[in-house]
Amino acid sequence: MPTEAKEKRPAARGRPRDPSLAARRRHEILDAAAKLFAQRGFAATDLQVVADELSVGKGTLYRYFPSKGRLFLAAVDRGMRRLRECVDAACETVGDPLEQIVAAMGAYLGFFDAHPEFAELLIQERAVFRDRKKPTYFEHREANIGRWRSLFAGLIAEGRIRDVPPEQITNVLSNAGYGTMFTNFFTGRRRPLQAQAREIVDVVLHGILTPAERVRRGASGGRKSR
Amino acid sequence: MPTEAKEKRPAARGRPRDPSLAARRRHEILDAAAKLFAQRGFAATDLQVVADELSVGKGTLYRYFPSKGRLFLAAVDRGMRRLRECVDAACETVGDPLEQIVAAMGAYLGFFDAHPEFAELLIQERAVFRDRKKPTYFEHREANIGRWRSLFAGLIAEGRIRDVPPEQITNVLSNAGYGTMFTNFFTGRRRPLQAQAREIVDVVLHGILTPAERVRRGASGGRKSR
Amino acid sequence: MPTEAKEKRPAARGRPRDPSLAARRRHEILDAAAKLFAQRGFAATDLQVVADELSVGKGTLYRYFPSKGRLFLAAVDRGMRRLRECVDAACETVGDPLEQIVAAMGAYLGFFDAHPEFAELLIQERAVFRDRKKPTYFEHREANIGRWRSLFAGLIAEGRIRDVPPEQITNVLSNAGYGTMFTNFFTGRRRPLQAQAREIVDVVLHGILTPAERVRRGASGGRKSR
Amino acid sequence: MPTEAKEKRPAARGRPRDPSLAARRRHEILDAAAKLFAQRGFAATDLQVVADELSVGKGTLYRYFPSKGRLFLAAVDRGMRRLRECVDAACETVGDPLEQIVAAMGAYLGFFDAHPEFAELLIQERAVFRDRKKPTYFEHREANIGRWRSLFAGLIAEGRIRDVPPEQITNVLSNAGYGTMFTNFFTGRRRPLQAQAREIVDVVLHGILTPAERVRRGASGGRKSR
DNA sequence: CATGAATGAGTATTCATTCAT
DNA sequence: TATGAATGAATACTCATTCAT
């Protein structure tokens, strides 16, 4: 890899810095930290065990992160970034917007299923950094929610979806996903992931009422259905 | 429950114990503990401050609870018990089962809105007692879920609700509620509680598709709708 | 000792406080701390060794002093208080003011000779608490200097001492004592203490010039000698 | 000194070393070290900040001094050497021996007044290197004291000074100077330096007694005054 | 020669728990 | 029964020193 090649600058005095080494090291540290913080909890994780896992000295960790807390937070942040990449990638493989929803939900649940350590870290984060105004998860969620709102607004304009405020839709979906993810995490998932995703989206798309009941309830829930 | 029964020894000598005193004290301790654990976090809460808050000696706490952890867990458990009472009470005021769902969702969100300390405790619990197989919240949820499944099974039998597996419905609703509750807790609620509850239930009852789209998607999502 | 008797207050709940015990404990701790801090230096003295010396737990020390630093400072302060008592006591045994000076100087040098740990602590104090505006030693010195200035002013009024500003006299004497004390401490004293005290005071009282030289230098040094 | 001599290897190949460069670098390091050690204390001074101050790598310091402690000690030693040069230079400008005393005292106090960092270092030295038999200051003092004893012996022989043991005189003067220097350092000087020096020497030369009192006390203090 | 990345020994303080009173 | 004095295990972070480059 050319980025990792050490191009000798001819007259550099002393031990040259290797920035790519530092970046690689940073990632290795975050990997180990995420794993161990999730495994044992933030408080119970002596940075020594992180260092041991990596076979480096404890002091080395402090060369890359100024404190235990900052290391932890960096690990959470990287996790959320990866979640986003994962969901985005899943959406790109699908054309139909309604199917994108299923794909996104599946990717979301799948990410935390494959990396339960990040679910754990989200909990730890809140428990330990109670003051931080907004948990990292919600920072990322809010950065992301706009595109979904647009998507639903478009579908409403196209007449494919009822004229419900897009925010209401994204809220219900986001929260159902969020709640399902944690429930899976805490109690163990029993249904296949994709089925789970499809079931959630199915309920939200079609509702659960029979046509007869739907008529009976009439205006109350069935706002302007064009 | 049998473990909490106080077996009366028939003819106690001397000054009769006042069991209600002990019970009252227990509750006072749990109140103070819930408040302080939520305020400062489990680890950061010195039992001394709990004792101070109650104007008792630290040793006294140990007469009522065998350890800090058990005190904490008891506080969480009592919170969940109260949540259940609160939701049950709300349901009893409503006749129509579909409206019961709205009432329950409203009571659920309302409880955590009025007592955010219990949301905090749920997080703390997981962060600290990572080993306990199942969080208290889910123990209570599972003890409770059966009656909702029956309710939906009944509605399906009555033809008011599509023939969707009741478990799927309770899952979506529970998780949407759970997710909404934590989202409210973390980011601050912006919508009135009852509106929030109604919006969730509305989406789940009616779905978001337009009739036209519903037809277009046909069988895929609209399993046996009788 | 009546002050140490535990008078039982009839209806005191719980383990009663024993204030005299606390005071005794405090002194024991200060004794051990002064000794060990002087022996090993402030930084090199783990409070554990102080605790071990006293056969108590380390936590107990923190019940009496809020930090290592405050324990140290308390030890220094108590030392200076004792120095003062020691010097005062020596003065009271002597009538003639000029002899009081010798007595005070002897007591002063004697105190640090008997308790070299306090000389050590004075140095440690400055080295460690560089910020504290004024070292404990000088706080006590300034609290004490007034009475000596008065004494010299009186002697000048009586015509026993030349009309030199009393402050000049106390400065020279204090500093000569202070310097001698540290020199003794650092290099080991070689002369008997009382001889040393007498020699200092002798030089200061009589000066070192011969009468002939004194005449030759005339007015320059011999301000109004009445 | 032989240990510091650089034995020139006659015909060095390649780029000739510049020994003066090394010497200059050594001095720069000592300057920075003295300043920083005094400013922040020995223990609190990270060698990194010394390196930063000089814009060199931390490793470079170790090319000039084998350890932090030796660097510190070298800085103290150089300070004492400079003190001596300073005092010697002051004496050379004055002819009369008695005036030399004033000049020396003034130079001594002036040196520490201009370079309070060296007073600080003397304290740090003792606090940190409690084991070193004799502080650097006293090593230099003893190397220097002989010439003063000779000076006083000469003055006694000339009949200008009473027949007091010269050691007694040098002790009182040295210690008064030493004590005054530290007092100035700790509490801030209030009198002009030269006045301070003159006042000390004045008291020591003329004493403080009035002629009348001097007669009254007679033999007691006035040993053989020729 | 010079550098700075890596190391890991070293330490004050807190707080759950016990138990003498 | 209630108390609070005593305890000691447990833990993040720094920085002198080394040595590969």
Image (cartoon, coloured by chain):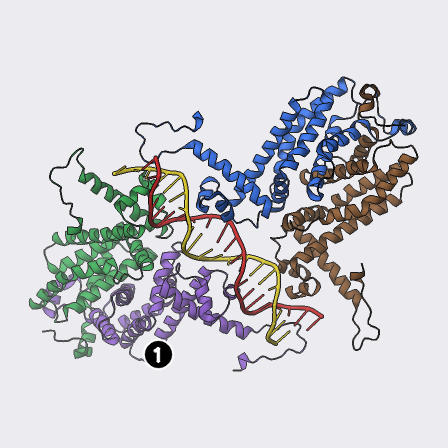
Chain colours: A blue, B brown, C purple, D green, E yellow, F red
Q: Residue furthest bottom?
A: C1
Which of the chains bears the disc numbered 1?
C
- Give the image quarter of residue B220: top right
The answer to whether residue D15 is seen in the rendering is yes
User: Is residue D101 or residue A47 the one in the foreground?
Assistant: A47
| Above-or-below relation of A203 to F3 | above
Q: Label 1 sits on what residue type?
A: Glu
> D143 or A78, which is in the foreground?
A78
Position of residue A215 relative to residue B145, above or below, is: above
Q: Residue furthest top?
A: A158
* Residue located 62% across and 29% down the image: A86
Q: Nearer the viewer, residue B128 or B49?
A: B128
Q: Is residue A151 left or right of residue C50?
A: right
Name the residue carrying label 1: C92
- Dot 1 falls on a residue whose secondary structure is helix
In which quarter of the view is residue A169 placed? Answer: top right
Does the rendering let one see residue C142? no
Residue at (31% x, 27% y) in the render? A10
Question: In the displayed structure, would residue A113 be above or below residue C5?
Answer: above
Residue found at x 70% / y 30%: A105
Question: Where residue C92 sits in the image (x, y, percent)?
Answer: 35, 78
